[in-house]
Amino acid sequence: YPLFLPKQLYYNPATNQTIYEKPLPLSPYFPFDEHKYHVLAYLVEEIGCSVCIFINYGTDTLFYSFMSYVLGQIDILKYFLNNFDSYSKKIKGQLDCDDDRADFVTMQLCIFEHQRIISEIALANSKISAEENNEKNIDSYYDFNGISVDIQNPEPFSKDAETLEQVEMAVDNNSSNENNLMGASSSKESDNERDLENFTDFEDSGSEYDPDTAIAKSTGSSSDSTLEQIEDENLKQTKRTERKGRPKKGRNAKYLGQTFRNRKKLKDSNKKHYSIKGKLIKPKIFIDFLCNCTLKCNESISQENRKKVFENFWGLASYNAQTAYIAATVRQQGIKRKRNKQSTRRQYTRVYEISNIKVCRDMYIKTLHISPKRVNTALKKIKTGSVKDERGFIQGGHIKLSEETKNKVIHQISKFPTYISHYTRNESDAKYSVPDHTLRKMYHLYTEDELNHKLGFSSYKTIPIL
């Protein structure tokens, strides 16, 4: 019977007794007549209690499972942080777990890796006999192929081996099956280095030599100091790029440290660098050139002397200094004998010297490893009185407006009527043009008056009017 139905009192006069009983909530036929509201109340009570019980137990179960998962992950992370030193060598090169800014995927892989190690520890502990358990703590030691390592104090002690290198070799043997899956981060750096090595270098000297067979032995003391300065600047730039906070606007450098200034220093000092297009430029190497000229250059100057000149030339590490050196060792003089006085084909001849010894042009160029155009440029700069490298600097003057053109524009604008503003009359005597006379209209009137003009509107509006 439903609990909410009250007991009703009945009196039986035949027996002179008072009876307490509960009325039946259901009728033997449908509909329920006067007992209908009792049935609805019964159904609402039963359904409501069932729903409340289900919600209560369901929320408790979900909350318990969620908190147990979170607490389990926290315990794993604590174990990972406490015993990181013992496993860092095993995972180094495979995962960047020691990176402060490691992403979520990397940290998750680290946790999975240490879960696997924990399972291996449990498996190894299960195989240890009871006698060994008395000597060592099962939870604090792990056996790497016969070499025991203390997890709480991760320094190897001698069981079958005494060196840390053997420990690392044993760790690598245990993790050889996971190297293909966990070595994605280390393979990226090797791929980048392999791509950079695939670049080829093409020299303009015409010689067929392999730059990889003889890497520059021609570095002087001055070039070494220049290289150290460049490395310091590269380190400073690396620190600037790794700064925290708002990221810098613009594109990132394709090759870190290869700024225009550093690239120029590396090029002038004959060091390996990257061009603007990303091509790897390898250092130039001294080549023994066999000359068959009438001056007999190979006999007059030795190979060691020419190699020393090559090293000193690129040891200057300055374009201006190298240009001055070329201008000092190459002289232009008049032709000694003219076969035809009216011929204007050749007006002078050049004398090339190496260590005050006269040589031919090919020997001079091949020794310094430069092109004939470099010699022509150096001699042209001597005529101007300066050997300074002015490439990349704005010279100006080739589109400069003449004073005559400026005076014409000023005279034309002064013809238009002007007025003084009523609001600023007491403060200044500035004059303003009529609102209908715009600069565009004034320029059109100027073009009608000056038919042969070469003045654009952008230059017209920048001319100052006093």
Image: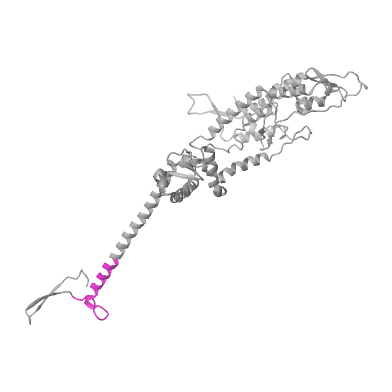
Residue at the farthest front position: 131
Within the image, what quadrant is residue 25 found in? bottom left
The answer to whether 32 is drawn above or below residue 237 in the figure is: below
Specify whether 413 is left or right of 313.
left
Q: Quadrant of residue 41?
A: bottom left
**Dominant secondary structure (helix, strand or loop) of the stretch shown in magenta:** helix
Estimate the x, y position of residue 466 in percent, counting from the top left: 59, 24
Q: Residue furthest left?
A: 16
Q: Residue at x 73, y 20 (%)?
A: 324
Residue bounds of the magenta highlight:
23-47
Q: Nearer the viewer, residue 319 or 442?
A: 319
* Residue found 72% across the figure and 23% down from its top: 313
Residue at the limit of the structure toward the bottom, as seen here: 14
- What is the x, y in percent for residue 454? 70, 32
Left or right: 377 with respect to 54? right
Is there any visible trace of residue 321 in the rendered image? yes
- Residue 255 at x, y percent in the picture: 61, 36
The one nearer the camera, 92 or 135, is 135
Of 37 and 115, nearer the camera is: 115
Q: How is the image coloured?
A: one colour
As for residue 30 lying within the magenta part, the answer is yes
Q: Is residue 453 visible?
A: no
Q: Looking at the rendering, in which quadrant would you find the N terminus? A: bottom left
Residue 219 inside the magenta-drawn segment = no
Number of labels in the image equals 0
Q: Residue furthest right?
A: 339
Q: Is residue 340 left or right of residue 206?
A: right
Q: Is residue 330 above or below residue 281?
A: above
As displayed, is residue 42 above or below residue 406?
below
Residue 216, horizontal then vertical, whole percent: 70, 29
Kindly indicate the quadrant of the structure image that contains residue 327: top right
